[in-house]
Amino acid sequence: MDIPYFIKPFVDTGLGNSAYLIGSHETKKGILIDPLRDVDRYLSAAAENGIQLTHVLDTHLHADFVSGNREIANQTGALIGASAEAHVEFEHHPLTEDSVIDLGAFQIRVMTTPGHTPEHISFLLVGADGKTPSALFSGGALIVGGAARTDLLSEELTLPLASHLYHTIHDKLLKLPDAVDVFPTHGAGSFCIAPASNDRVTTIGRERMTNALAQPQSEEEFIKRALTGLPLYPTYYKYMRAINKRGGKILGGVPVLKPFSAAEVKSLIDDGAVVLDIREQKPFSAGYIPNSYGIRLEAPLLVWAGWVIPFGSKVILLGDSAEQRYEATRQLIRIGYDDMIGYLDGGIDAWARNYPVETIQSMNVKELHKRLSEVTVVDVRRQSEWDAGHIAGAIHFEGGRIALENLPFPTDKPLAIQCASGNRSMIAISVLKRRGFHNVIQVEGGISHWQRNKFEVVRDQPNLMTL
C-alpha cells in the first residue's frame, strides 16, 4: 500500500536542527514544522512537489534560532500554529490536545509534552481514519538517544521541567506503538542537547530499547541522568525565546547588504560598529582589521557569532566573495543578528591601502613542545574534550566563555591558544585581542597535531587548572 504523504527533512548541521515538510500526494496540501527564518528552501521544496502550505507549526519557543513561522505565513498565507501555553503575541491559532489539523490524507494531532520548555507540544501524524499513528514530530521532547535539556530557561525551572520531561516520556510518548517513527527537531550539533547520537530520526521502539532516559527508572534517577553532562551553550540563547514570543521581524528574504568604502567602514567602527571577518584562518591571521572578530563560515559562524559578538551589535562583514557574504547573512539572520549594515567593498586589500592591519603569531606543535616552559598554554575546547586528554600544565578555559567572563590569565609569558585543530583557537584569539591580550600565539593544528606527533597528553590533571 502506498503511503499517501511524504516527509521531507531539512537539516541545518550548524545549529544541529531539523525542520520538516509533510505533504499530501492527493490533496497537494502540506504542513511545515519548526522552520528556520530563511524560508526559501522550504518554499522551493513545496513548489517542486506542487504543495500548498496550509499550516506552519512550532513545537516550542525556540532558544537557538528565530522561527520562520511569520516569514512563511507572510509569503504563503499559511496559518501559524503554536502552543496555547506559549502565549505568543502575534496572530496564530493556539494549539491544545483538542486540536486536530486534517489534511484529508492524514491528520496532525497535538500532544502536550512539557519538559524541554513549559509550553512544549509534539505533533502526532495519524492516518485518514484518525486512529493509526505513524510518525511523531517530537521537537525536543524525545530525540535520538536522549531528550533536549531543561536548564535553558532558569535555574529555578530546571528541576521542575526535568520532572515534567520524565512524565512526558514515560507516561505519554512511550505509550505510543514501537513502529511510530520519531522526527526530532534537535539533533547532533545542537547545544539544546547533551550529545547522544549523530542520527537524526528514530522510532519509539528504538528509543524504548536504547535511550537511557526511556529505560525503567525512578523520577529521581531520570532527573540526575537528564542533568548530567550538559555542555555550555551560546550566550545568544537568552534572547531567542523573547523574540519568538513576540514574533521575529519579517524580512521577506535574505537581506542584501550595502557596500562601504574603507573610509566609511572606519567611520562606522568609530561609531561602535564591529567587523566580522569570515575568511579562513590563514588569510585572517596574515592581516585583519584591528578588533575584528575572526569567525570563518564553517566554524560554524552562526554558533560562534552568537557566542562572542554582543547581541544587537551593528555588524560589518568582511569576506572574500559575494557568495561568502550571502551565506554569512543567511546564517546570522537565523539567530536574530538583524543589524548587519553592510560589507567592506574591496575586502582587506581596500582597508590595507589606507589603514594598518594586525597579524597573529602562530607556532606548530613541534615548536610548542620545545617551548612549553616559555609559554602558557590555554586550551579552549569543551570540558568533555579536555577530560579526554590535554597538554600537561595547560589552563582550560572554554572558548565560549572568553568574550564575557573575567580572564585570569597570567601575563608574564605569551599565551599559546590551543583547540582541537585551529578553528576555535583563532576565534578565541580575535576576542582576546579585543580584550587587550596581545601577546598571544595560535597553536597550528591544535591537540590533533600534538597527538599525531605522539606528544604526551594527560587525563588525570586536577581540576584546579580548569578556570
Image (cartoon, grey):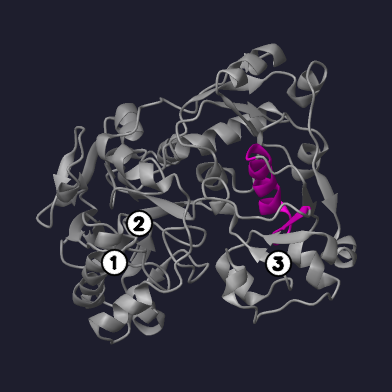
Label 1 to label 3: alpha-carbon separation? 51 Å
Residue 344: assigned label:
none
Magenta-drawn segment: 414-435
Q: Nearer the viewer, residue 48 or 74?
A: 74
Q: Is residue 94 above or below residue 381?
A: above
Q: Position of residue 285 (x, y in %)?
A: 79, 40
Please tell me whether mark 3 or mark 2 is closer to you in this view: 3
Residue 156 part of the magenta segment: no
Query: Viewed as shown, does residue 290 lie left or right of 317?
Result: right
**Crowdedness of circle 1 by 10 Å Cα count: few (<14), some, many (20+)?**
some
Residue 44 appears in the figure:
no
Q: Residue at x 48, y 71 (%)?
A: 196
Q: CA distance from mark 2 to mark 1?
A: 31 Å
Which picture quadrant has residue 377? bottom right
Q: Which mark is residue 152?
A: 2
| Disc number lying in front (1 or 3) | 3
Q: Which residue is mark 1?
A: 134
Q: Secondary structure at mark 1?
A: strand
**Which residue corresponds to mark 3?**
394
